[in-house]
Amino acid sequence: MQFRRYKPFSSAIGLVLGLLCAVESGKVNKHKPWIETTYHGIVTENDDKVLLDPPLIALDKDAPLRYAESFEVTFTKEGEICGFRIHGQNVPFEAVVLDKSTGEGVIRAKDKLDCELQKEHTFTIQAYDCGEGPDGANMKKSHKANVHIQVNDVNEYSPVFKEKSYKATVIEGKKYDSILKVEAVDADCSFQYSQICSYEIVTPDVPFSVDKDGNIKNTEKLTYNKERMYKLTVTAYDCGKNRASEDVLVKINIKPTCKPSWQGFNKRIEYEPGTGSLALFPSMRLETCEEPITSIQATIQLETSHIGKGCDRDTYSEKSLHKLCGASGNTVELLPTPSSAANWTVGLPTDNGHDSDQVFEFNGTQALKIPEGVVSTSLKEPFTVSVWMRHGPGAREKETILCNSDKTDMNRHHYSLYVHNCRLILLLRQDPTEAESYKPAEFHWKLDQVCDKEWHHYVLNIEFPSVTLFVDGVTFEPFLVTEDYPLHASKLETQLTVGACWQGGAAHMAQFFRGNLAGLMIRTGKLDNKKVIDCLYTCKEGLDVQMPEEVVNTVKVQFNPNQSSLTLEGDDIESFEKVMQHISYLNSRQFPTPGIRHLRISTTVKCFNEETCISVPDSEGYVMVLQPEEPKISLSGIDHFARGALDFESSEGVTLFPELRIVSTITREVEPEAEAEAETEGEDDPTVQETVVSEEIMHNLDTCEVSVVGEDLDGEHESLEVDLTQVQQRGLEMSSSNVGMIITGVNTMANYEQVLHLIRYRNWHTEALFDRKFKLVCSELNGRYISNEFKVEVNVIHTANPIEHANNAMVQPQFINPVHHASVDLSGHNLVNAHQSSVVPSAATIVIVVCVSFLVFMIILGVFRIRAAHQRTMRDQEGGKENEMDWDDSALTITVNPMETYEDQHSSEEEEEEEEESEDGEEEDDITSAESESSEDEEGAEPEDQQGASRQQQLEWDDSTLTY
């Protein structure tokens, strides 16, 4: 036995002391090795050395005693530790004995460990001794001990962001605690190296910051106008100070401050006349900024107060509008458009724009006296007064609209309509009766409309003792009626005035009106038909809505009377928006008034608490009504003709416009066919230009005025006449004066043509009359569109009295006479139809014709002498010129009395004249077959005695001309 010095282990002191007391003399392996029950170890990844706690040492009681350090103890084989065995599946470790005698060993990794794959390993280990004898028989094993090994991490990975990029949207003007959060991860397994300790914004000079958790916020309030999007580069660091392998891009969009409002509609909306209804808000939507909405109300207002009398209406005269609307009865217009027939409004300030109505301005110093006879002095009830009025807050004095008062001596007001303290008052004094008692005399209405500076339509139906007022089609009852005695009997005449009241006793005007008036009418009978009143008031333009079927029951729609405003109410935003998208503008006029119509949308929104939660500002825009294609009204026909004096003196007179034509055209720009074909083929031809064409259209007229050019008509011996029955049958009216005639009424151009064809001029003293000139002008829409001035000149032909000749030889040759039958008009004017009287030449024309005829006569004489000298030759040619020889013969042998039968000679003269005219080329352009036929037809219808008289006149006329 050998002994060695044994250095005891601190952890096995007790075992060694026991061995000192148990010395065996034999070689028997009695005891099992001993190890700790649990071991804990640490190994660094990428390394194989494991640090265990406690160290791996196996002890065996079979080993000899170890005494002190001063001597050596030698162990036998039976006490040695031969190895360690690890139990477990796929354990990446192995145990190695470093010293068999001491039982010291280590655990190490078989391969490099990866903490990211497995951070901890647990298995069991067992020690075994070397057994007995050389062959290790009777080997003993220790118990199994648990081993727990932790793999320590190495910071081998860098942080990686979870997203490739980040996006966020913020609203301007707000500071956020966190706009968005960026997040990076680290693949390391340890807490130290797998945690992200900080983030950093790499982009310099941006108003943002990021905290250690990756929350990005703005450091100042952002402005949409300054920057609409920011791009940031952000990186991350783990706790091992490793930076992210790739930085991440962060985009932050700046959104304007969310303001509840209507969006998606154009501020300017163009309306093309004649295109029907136009959708105003086809893409409109309501921005509520994600507020929960329970109800919504919107009012759409179309501003038309600056157009005409509050909106676009037909600008015909008020009298014509009454008739168009079906108001029957005798109507008198007290504020007509100034004309020759109604001139009392001349000098009163008016709205001169023909696009709008005829509006008269009263400034507090002006008034009108209505001429006598315009309104009957004995105005019987019931009657109606209607007027358009615009009046603002005025003084406390009375302002008279209409007044009928004593003309002289006294200041009694028989009836009047006036404004006082924003009240409309009608005074109606009764005529004297046998029983003098109090009767209703003043009717008071207190109305906001009287002083709101807006146009309103007033209709008063007066049927004593009751008076009914309609304002804009709505009925109002008087709030106060005062009584008074009837007027005392008097023979004084009355004066009807507009804009003030005549004070007969002081002979001056008083109670002047300040404001605008138009369409002041007095008519007999009541005007209580609501449809007629609505027709007079209703606008031709307004708002309209076509309700989609799916939202009919979800949105409530309400219009005002003239459809310039509508209100929507609903609780579903989607349905509400659909109705808004179907609101349209409509103007039914053929020629609407161009210009701007402002639009305003007022909205109220409520939330779940039934209170106004968000404020939706008013939205504004405008409809631009484009200029309509203006019609050009053209008058054409015969503008110069002559008639005999007897025609003017006859009962039927002379028709002034027998062939008048009224045509209206508009000018359009159209694409030529070449351009259309190029567009079809997809080719653009820069040389093709738009073509301007005229297109005939049909529309109404409301006035045609025939006026005398030169001196006024003298009613004692001349007049303009027309068949009133024909005029009235066509729904027109006629008025005449010494300056001409006016046809009025809204009607078609064809009806106006027919009436104008009937206008005749008569003059029963034509001795000193040589010509008369007239002018015709027609217009539409109260003078908005005016025709050309069509002028007609009528000449009067005076004929000399027939003279009996004592000698038949004194009669002029009859071949000169056919000049009259040919009806030549060498003046170059248009020719009348065959059914009219034949055209008679003027004096200059007669001179020319006579000279030419005399030249022809001299030629014929020369030809006759030649024929006489060559008689034989002429006889050979007589068969081919039989008619010509007859003409010459008849011309040279005229010796008959003018009263004798003339037919044979006249027929030969006509044949001779035809040949002469064919020879003379200068006369072909001035003579028409229509005139010749007309003359021949008229001559054939004359009695023989008239023919003789005509022949005498013609021969004497020719005789006078030959004296030149």
Image: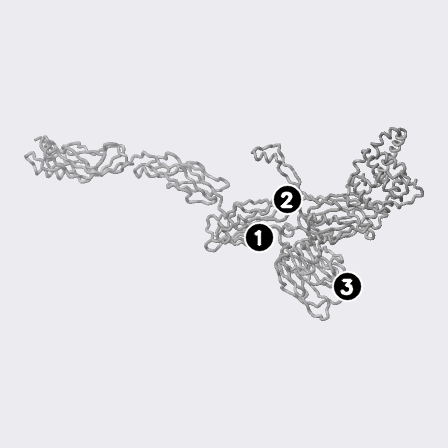
Q: Which residue is mark 1?
A: 565
The earlier-in-sequence mark between 2 and 3 is 3
The earlier-in-sequence mark between 3 and 1 is 3
Q: Position of residue 192 (x, y in %)?
A: 31, 38
Report helix, strand or loop for mark 1.
strand
Q: Is residue 859 above or below residue 635?
A: above
Quarter of image, res 408: bottom right
Q: Which residue is mark 2?
A: 627
Residue found at the very far left of the displayed protein: 25
Quarter of image, res 379: bottom right
- Numbered mark located on residue 492 in the image: 3
Q: Position of residue 74 (x, y in %)?
A: 10, 32
Which color scheme is applied? one colour
Is residue 160 or residue 467 the one in the foreground? 467
Q: Mark 2 or 3, which is nearer the eye?
A: 2
Badge 2 crowding class, 10 Å Cα cut-off, few under 14, some 14 to 19, many 20 or more, is some
Is residue 535 or residue 14 the one in the foreground? 535
Is residue 610 or residue 718 the one in the foreground? 718
Instruction: Tell me the kind of residue under disc 2.
Output: Gln
Marks 3 and 1, Cα distance to the nearest angstrom? 51 Å
Instruction: Tell me the kind of residue under disc 3.
Output: Leu
Residue 615 visible from this viewpoint: no
The earlier-in-sequence mark between 1 and 2 is 1
The image quadrant where one finds the C terminus is top right
- Could you tell me if the residues under marks 1 and 2 are in contact, i.e. CB atoms within 8 Å? no
Residue 129 visible from this viewpoint: yes
- All told, the count of numbered labels is 3
Instruction: Tell me the kind of residue under disc 1.
Output: Ser
Report helix, strand or loop for mark 3.
loop
